[in-house]
Amino acid sequence: MSGPREIDLFAMLKHTNSQLAAVAQKQRIKGIFTSPPYVGLINYHEQHAYAYDLFGFKRLDELEIGPLFRGKGREARESYIHGVVEVLKNCKRFLADDYDVFVVANDKFNMYPTIAETAGMHIVNQHKRPVLNRTEKNRSSTYPETIFHLKETRKKS
């Protein structure tokens, strides 16, 4: 499996708005709030197939992090950890020194402490909440989500 493709956000921004790109590159990005895929829970490419058809995007199902078709076994979880870590490391290239990253995750396999540490971050705080309203077909069960607050792990001098 190949990893996430690195994208130079500032270069892309410069292509569309050079003034904004200059400000963003100087000030950097202060924070991210994201909800990455949950390991083995949803087939996101299939769930959003209409968008691929509508906009003519090429599907890259094999690059999806944590897809349903890979399941939830040890290998799938290791692949998920690697994928999320690579995304976080890529994001750090654009973040300000004192950034805040908030990740909404169903972490029933307790992967986010490893993800944070491997990405050079630490968990500052966690907020747990139940998911009661769902959009996919199997709406009968609820599950917990955690919002992880991550920050850079400072190297000791």
Image (spheres, grey):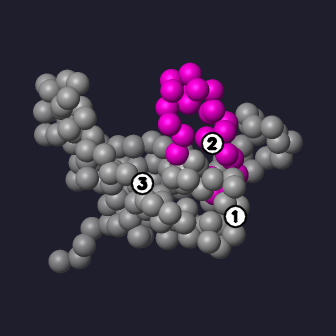
Q: Is residue 100 above or below residue 120?
A: above
Q: Which residues are magenta?
A: 38-60
Viewed as shown, does residue 32 lie left or right of 145?
left
- Distance from the alpha carbon under mark 1 to that under mark 2: 15 Å
Residue 156 seen in this snapshot:
yes
- Distance from the alpha carbon under mark 3 to that under mark 1: 20 Å
The label number, if any, that marks residue 44 in the structure image: 2
Mark 3 vs mark 1: in front: 3
- Element carrying mark 3: loop
The picture places residue 64, in percent across and down from the top left corner, at 55, 51
- The residue lying toward the viewer, choosing from 74 and 146, is 74
- Three-letter residue code for mark 2: Tyr
The picture places residue 58, in percent across and down from the top left corner, at 50, 37
Q: Are marks 1 and 2 in contact (CB under 8 Å)?
A: no
3 or 1: tag closer to the N-terminus: 3
Q: Is residue 38 above or below residue 115?
A: above
The picture places residue 21, in percent across and down from the top left corner, at 18, 32
1 or 2: tag closer to the N-terminus: 2
- Three-letter residue code for mark 3: Pro
Picture quarter with the C terminus: bottom left
- The residue lying toward the viewer, choosing from 147 and 14, is 14
